[in-house]
Image (tube, rainbow, N blue to C red):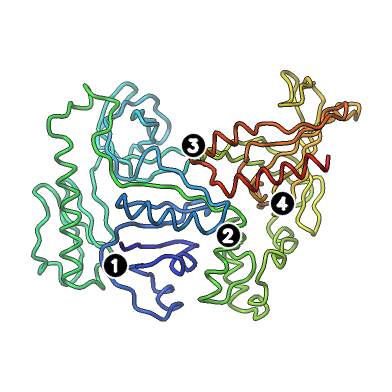
Amino acid sequence: MSVRVRGVYATALTALLEDVVQASPPIRERFDADFPVEPADATVETTGDRQGVCVAGDEECVAAVTDRLRGAGRDTLAWPAALPCGAVYAGEITETLGGGAVVDVGDGEGYLPYSKTARHVEEGDCLRVQVREPSPPWTSGRPVLDTTLRVHGALVGLVRGGTASATGPELADLVPTDPPEGWAPDWGRASEDASLDALDAALDRTGERARALDAAFEGAPPPAEGAPRRYYDGDATRWVWFGRESRFALDEHRRGVVETMAGHHRVKAATEGASAAVDFVEAVCEAASEWTGPCDFPFDAAARQFGPREGETVTIAHGKPDGRCLSLGRAEVTARDPDGSVTVRRDISGGGTYDALGVQRRDGDEAITKLEEGRWWYPTVYRGADGTKRGTYVNVCTPVEVFPDEVRYVDLHVDVVRTPDGTVRRVDDDELDAAVDAGNVPDDLAAKAREVAGALENAL
């Protein structure tokens, strides 16, 4: 099985995976090796927010690659895409926005830019759409849809009802395989370096997928009669999210190939500016190669340069083991220590009770949370307007990452609380058990969560 890898994790994942093809020039240079230019069974691409990767392609290969990536660290988590890459649906427009329309396709909602459809659309219209850009479950964005049907491939794709691309490899005219009727080839950049046999194999493979897509419409109702429904499954698509511990493990894989500072992937996951800074430091500073472990991670320097700083605000991004990410709101940074911790404050509105504490929320209450980079838990102390402590809630989670604009982690359900009368209780073990049974939390990660919860229960 062959894999094409792109993005900020490319060097580490090329070292971790086998049978990488279509490697980029920097990867070929770093590994000092020639990589085959042939069709890939799966692609691995970094997500737009650099938190993880999307793995898409052949089901068997995607499953194998996902399993390998999950082995990078115990806080690597993976989920199937609700709307897979390349899937085709009959969908109904439920809302029109300034630049596009929201489309209900049954498996979820997608976003159809007006530029991706040749017709005027309104609420209630039904039409056939294809998933062009899937969206990670931990973001609020919707997958991007298109009304033009395509079969993607790095060497050659096919466009239904389109015309052949004006440019292509020199060997394009010699490829013996013809595209299916009604489909036009769209040659990719990598095709310039491919052999005739590789180009022929790529066109044959995309042709098979195009014929399968055509067959999916045979006997199927038109969108106006069948929406919402899925016509065609598209590629197997999995999302893989890397936690802090996993990012440092990927540093080790990269370090075996090229000079890599401690926290390379941790910093690159923050902002574009921080990512560029890492490249600069590693290029000009010989000492960077001596920073090799989590303890060497220059948190204070990164925070001073990129944030967060005292007086600024950050979002607390509360990840869930099923892939969702909930915002606990923005909080003011009241203190930041060089050791990697920040203290944040949030105002609490009245109404309801605090989870597991059984204490009423009142107007004027505040939440003081201390978040320490790399720690498997964090405490929140709730206080009343008069300063009275109203309880403490300690979240057990994957190692905390304090980025310039947000704090990220994945909540592991089991938590420890201390009520105003001093009673300490451990809660939500059953929710962690259910997440393990659902396959959302690996056994070793669950064991760590229970260990941390036990230590906190004893300490409080």
Disc 1 designates what residue?
190
Pointer 3 or 1: first along the chain: 1
Q: Are marks 4 and 1 in contact (CB under 8 Å)?
A: no
Tell me which numbered mark, 4 or 3, is placed earlier along the sequence.
4
Instruction: Residue under label 2, please give it.
Output: 247
CA–CA distance between discs 4 and 3?
25 Å
Disc tally is 4
Q: Is residue 70 above or below residue 194?
A: above
Please, what is the three-letter code of the amino acid marked with disc 1? Ala
Q: CA distance from mark 4 to mark 1?
A: 43 Å
Q: Amino acid under label 4?
A: Arg
Question: Relative to 289, is 161 on the left or the right?
Answer: left
Q: Which residue is mark 4?
A: 375
Q: Is residue 78 visible?
A: yes
Earlier along the polypeptide chain: callout 2 or callout 4? 2
Q: Which residue is mark 3?
A: 438
